């Protein structure tokens, strides 16, 4: 899968120029070459412009489909970033329980006590090592998806305005 880049103004102008000149085949071909959800929405508008279905409904449906595709794995990433520190905390608790049991059983054997504290610290660190990058990436991808959604909305509105009957 290719990386999705932000929309750029020259491409938007080229698309709108095709639509102004009513070169719908060229506009559709142009949209097929682009790797951005906005162009997939515009393509659905172009392909359905002669149908009886309301064009705005088609645009909304395709926008929802594109956003669902972009958000497909975000819940998993969000869950990982949420659960990882909790697992680390669980390890902390179990490690401290071991430490206190060892301390209770024999005040003279520090190795068992240290083993429990060691477990607590390692599991906490591992939970944070997983959680921090996961949370950073989750927030990054949420921001990217929101940007794509805004760009898609703006381009869709421009296309719908261009295709609407002139008064």
Image (cartoon, rainbow, N blue to C red):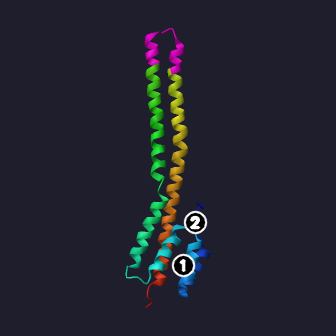
Magenta span dominant secondary structure: helix
Residue 101 in picture, x, y percent from top left: 43, 16
Q: Is residue 145 above or below residue 12?
A: above
Return the x and y of residue 150 as percentages of the image width and height.
49, 67
Query: Residue 104 lies in magenta, yes or no?
Result: yes
The x and y percentages for residue 140 are 54, 54
Q: Magenta segment, which residues?
A: 99-115
Q: Which residue is mark 2?
A: 6
Residue drawn where x is 44% and y is 11% of the image:
105
- Relative to 142, residue 20 above or below: below
Q: Nearer the viewer, mark 1 or mark 2?
A: 1
Check the image and report above or below for 122 versus 159. above
Of the 4 image quadrants, the one containing the N terminus is bottom right
Does the magenta run of residues contain 14? Answer: no
Which quadrant of the view contains residue 57?
Answer: bottom left
How many numbered marks, from 0 up? 2
Tag shown at residue 166:
none
Secondary structure found at label 2: loop
Cα–Cα span, label 1 and label 2: 19 Å
Q: Which residue is mark 1?
A: 28
């Amino acid at each position: 899968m290719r990386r999705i880049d932000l929309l750029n103004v020259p491409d938007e102008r080229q698309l709108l120029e095709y639509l102004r000149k009513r070169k719908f085949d060229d506009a559709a071909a142009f949209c097929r070459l682009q790797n951005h959800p906005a162009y997939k929405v515009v393509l659905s508008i172009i392909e359905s412009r002669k149908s009886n279905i309301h064009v705005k409904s088609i645009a909304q449906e395709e926008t929802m489909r594109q956003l669902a595709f972009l958000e497909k794995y975000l819940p998993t990433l969000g869950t990982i970033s949420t659960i990882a520190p909790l697992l680390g905390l669980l390890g902390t608790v179990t490690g401290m329980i071991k430490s206190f049991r060892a301390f209770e059983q024999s005040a003279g054997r520090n190795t068992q006590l240290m083993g429990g504290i060691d477990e607590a610290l390692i599991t906490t660190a591992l939970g944070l090592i997983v959680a921090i990058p996961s949370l950073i990436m989750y927030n990054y991808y949420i921001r990217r998806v929101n940007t794509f959604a805004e760009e898609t909305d703006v381009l869709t509105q421009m296309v719908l305005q261009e295709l609407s009957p002139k008064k």
